[in-house]
Amino acid sequence: MPILRDAKTAQRIVKNLIRSRLHRRELARRGPTVSSLPGGSVQVAVYFADTKVNLYQLRQWYAPLAELSKTRPVAIIARSPGTALALIGESPVPVVYLRTVSELEDFVASQEFRIIFYVNQNSKNFQMFRYGRMWHVFINHGESDKMYMTTNQFKAYDYSLVAGEAARDRLRRKLWDFELDRRTIMIGRPQADHFVGALPYSPDDRSVVLYAPTWEGDRGAAAYGSVASHGEALVAALLATGRHRVIYRPHPRTGVIDQDFRRSNEAIIAAIAAANAQDRAAQHVFDDGPTLGWQLAAADVAITDISAMVYDRLATGKPLIVARPVSPDAEIDASGYLGDAEWLAAEDAGDIVAAIDRVQHNEEAQRRLEFWVERHFGDTTPGEATRRFHAAVEHLVAEWEQHAALHAADLLAVDEFGRGSSLDLESDDD
C-alpha cells in the first residue's frame, strides 16, 4: 500500500538522520585529528561523496594510492560522516571530512590541487566539478563490460584512466564526438600488483573456487546477479565433492532490493557453515571483509557475474567462468571478452564441477584467456601497471604545471570558490 511504503520511507529517513548526527558528534569529538590537513600539503585527492555501502569502490584503490603517496601527497575527501569514520579507521592515506560546500570551498582554497580522482558517478561529484584549476580524472572502481562503462558521463571529466584497448574500443563504439585519444590514458590494473593478503585457510590439495557474484541491480538492464538463479545449486555441488574449497564473496549490496537474493545469500552462507561443521578440514570461506585481492590470486578457478570482478580476475591471467544473467533485459556487450567467455547458464549450475575441469585443462580455453588478458590490460608483468599509473599521474601533473604557468597572471575570479554565495549544501547521507 502507498501509505505503508511512505511510512517505511519516512522511518528510514529518520533513522539515517539520527545515525548521521551520531557520526557527526563522534567526528566532532575527535576534533582536529580528523578534519585538518596543512595548507598546500595535498596535490592529489580522491573525492568520495558516497555512503559506506559503496566504500568497496574506494577500498580497491587503497594500495595503489598508498604507493602513489610515496611520491605525491594524496588525501581522500569524504562528504558523509559515516563514511569518514570508516575511512579514518582503515585508509592508508589521510582523510578529510567536509560536510558543507563552504567547508569544501575553504579546503580547496587552502590547497594547490593538481588532480582530483573519482571512483564513481555519484551526482554529488558535480559539487567538486565546479573548480576549474585542477584536473578532474575518472579512475572508476573496476574494468568491465557493464553499460556503466560507456556512460556519457565520461565526458564530464578532463581525463579518464582506463585499463586497456578493450576499454577504449568500448568508448569508441558508444560515445559520440568523444576525444578518446586525448582524454583517456591506458594504465592496466594497478590493483593487481597488490593482490596479496593472509589466507584464512591452510592450503592443501583441494581446488580453490572463488564465487564472487554481483548484486541484483536496480534496473533490468543491469540485472546481472546470479545469487538467486545459480548460487545455491553451484555452491551445493562444490561443497559436496570433498575436493573443492569454496570462497564465497557476495556483493555487499546483495539482497538490498530483491528478497529472493537475500534468501539465497543467507542459504549459501548457512550451507558453508554447515559444511565446515561437518568437515573441519574443508575450511570453506564466507568472505565479507574489506580487502579484495588475495581471493583473486589464491583461487584456482573463479566464478563471477558480469561485473568488475570478471576483469579483476582476468588481470591475474587465471581461469574464470561467467554466470549468464537470467534476465532478458540484462545488457551484454558481446563485442569484447564476454563474446568469448566461458559461460554458465542457470540450468547448468549444478554441473559446475564439469565446467571447472574444462576451463582448467582445455588448451583452447587457455589460449582464449591469454588473448583477452592482453586485450584488456596490456602487459600484466608484476609492477608494470603501477609504473603506468604513476607515469599517467606525472603526465597530468606536467600538464597542470604547463597550464598554471600560462595562466599565472590571471586574477582569481571573485566567485572562483563561490565566495558570497548563499549555497551551503550539506552532505548528511550516511
Image: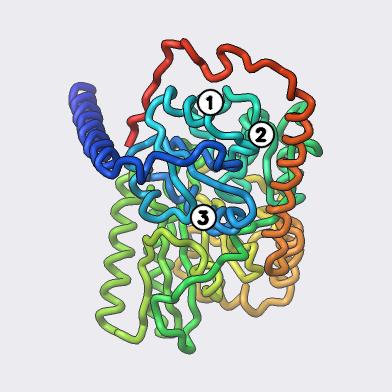
Seen from this angle, which residue lies furthest bottom? 205
* Element carrying mark 1: helix
Residue contact between numbered discs 3 and 1, judged by CB atoms under 8 Å? no
Upstream in sequence: badge 2 or badge 1 = 1
Could you say which is closer to the camera, residue 335 or residue 105?
105
Reading the image, the residue beneath label 3 is 62
- 211 sits to left or right of 13: right
Q: Secondary structure at mark 3?
A: helix
* Residue 221 visible to an observer of this rendering: no
Asked whether residue 106 is in view, the answer is yes
Query: Is 276 displayed left or right of 355 in the figure?
Result: left
Residue shown at 54%/20% (left/top)? Answer: 417
**Residue type, label 1:** Phe
- Looking at the picture, does residue 333 appear above or below residue 208? above
Q: Quadrant of the N terminus?
A: top left
Which quadrant of the structure image shows residue 319?
Answer: bottom right
Q: Amino acid at mark 2?
A: Trp
Q: Nearer the viewer, residue 307 or 2?
A: 307
Which label's residue is closer to the chain start, 2 or 3? 3
* Figure colour scheme: rainbow
Q: Quadrant of residue 35?
A: top left
Camera-near label (2 vs 1) is: 2
Question: Which numbered marker is on residue 405?
Answer: none
Separation (CA) of disc 3 from disc 1: 23 Å
Q: Using a 10 Å C-alpha cutoff, classify the residue at mark 2 as few (fewer than 14 neighbours), some (14 to 19) or many (20 or more).
A: many
Q: Residue at x 32, y 49 (%)?
A: 260
Provide residue 350's location: percent of width, then percent of height.
44, 68
Which residue matches tag 1?
126
The residue that disc 2 covers is 135
Q: Is residue 38 left or right of residue 269?
A: right
Between the C-alphas of marks 2 and 1, the distance is 14 Å
